[in-house]
Image (cartoon, rainbow, N blue to C red):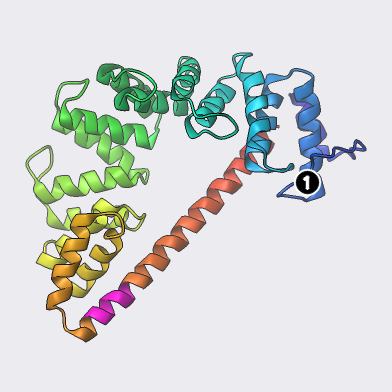
Amino acid sequence: MKAIRLLIFSLLIVSAVCTDVIAQNTDEDTIKRFLIIKKHAENGDAEAQNLAGLSYASGVGVKKDYAMAVKWYRKAAEQGYAEAQSNLAAMYGKGQGVQEDNVEAVKWFRKAAEQGHIKAQYFLGLYLYSGVGTPTDYSEAAKWYRKAAEKGHAAAQSDLGLMYYNGLGVSKDYAEAVKWYREAAELGDADAQARLGFGYAEGGKGLPKNEAEAVKWYRKAADQGNAIAQNNLAKMYSHGMGVPQDEVEAYAWYNLAAASMEAARKNRDIISRRLPPEARLAGQQRTKQLQREIENREIERLIKEDNKRKEDLLKGA
């Protein structure tokens, strides 16, 4: 692939005409890069085949086409290329470009996981935990979560913490649960932040009761759109736990969580009935403000993720 890197970054003029290059990202340099990648992929280079799959899956340099992404991922995966095996597994899991097949997803995630692919290790653990595409096996799930967690995968850290908290596949150990929750929470995992918040709110299971810390972690998760955290943060505002009592703020957070939580909807309606009309209106306006802020953060996250994916693609090329 060294030759590909030199070709791409020197931006040599490619005279070949390719009819399927009607790209979402249509700048000429990006299309040239894709054509170079595809040429090497057609010559059997596994890394280039995976990059071709990424290009088709993301629409970088070529029109998005999941079926073509699957084709190229499979060629690389069958050569033992771990990243392609993981990517192919994800396509099977989501039913993109191929009929959804969780058994096949597990098969390819396992092949990649056994080569040390971190994301595949996490997803293999997730499938084993949920019993989708494979029998439930908590011990095996914990094993694969741990492999990914020890390499810094935040979701794996959070889910491993949950297994320690519940004693699934491992001996129940609240201190170990908190350890993994905290590592994941500090990496920005919303589920871990919500779990850490709950631990501080309740106290006694690996954490001291500390309502101010609970509010801090609930807020971090709530700001990412985590409905459980939004509901729990609303409760803290409603009862003045860790923050000054503020029923308008409680109403707003319950209102946000109500979109996906029946309990939050009921709590919002209870508060709504005791709020005067002007306070209820303020709560509705605050809901809209919070929703805009959450959406803007999510847009920024997706843009960063998309840019990183494109950068990684070009670095890999």
Give the main secondary structure of the magenta stretch. helix
Q: Is residue 285 magenta?
A: yes
Kind of residue indicated by mark 1: Ile
- Give how far across and how far down residue 133 sits, in percent: 39, 22
Category of crowding for the residue at label 1, using alpha-carbon neighbours closer than 10 angstroms: few (below 14), some (14–19), many (at least 20): some
Q: Quick one: quadrant of the C terminus?
A: top right
Residue at 13% x, 56% y: name it: 211
Q: Nearer the viewer, residue 21 or 174?
A: 21
Image vertical order of residue 188 relative to residue 9, above or below = below
Count of numbered circles on the image: 1
Task: Note whether residue 175 is visible.
Answer: yes
Q: Is residue 2 magenta?
A: no
Q: Which residue is mark 1?
A: 22
Residue at 80% x, 32% y: name it: 36
Q: Range of the magenta residues?
A: 280-286
Tell which residue pokes out farthest to the front in this image: 99
- Give how far across and how far down residue 62 sits, in percent: 74, 41
- Give how far across and how far down residue 110 sits, in percent: 45, 17
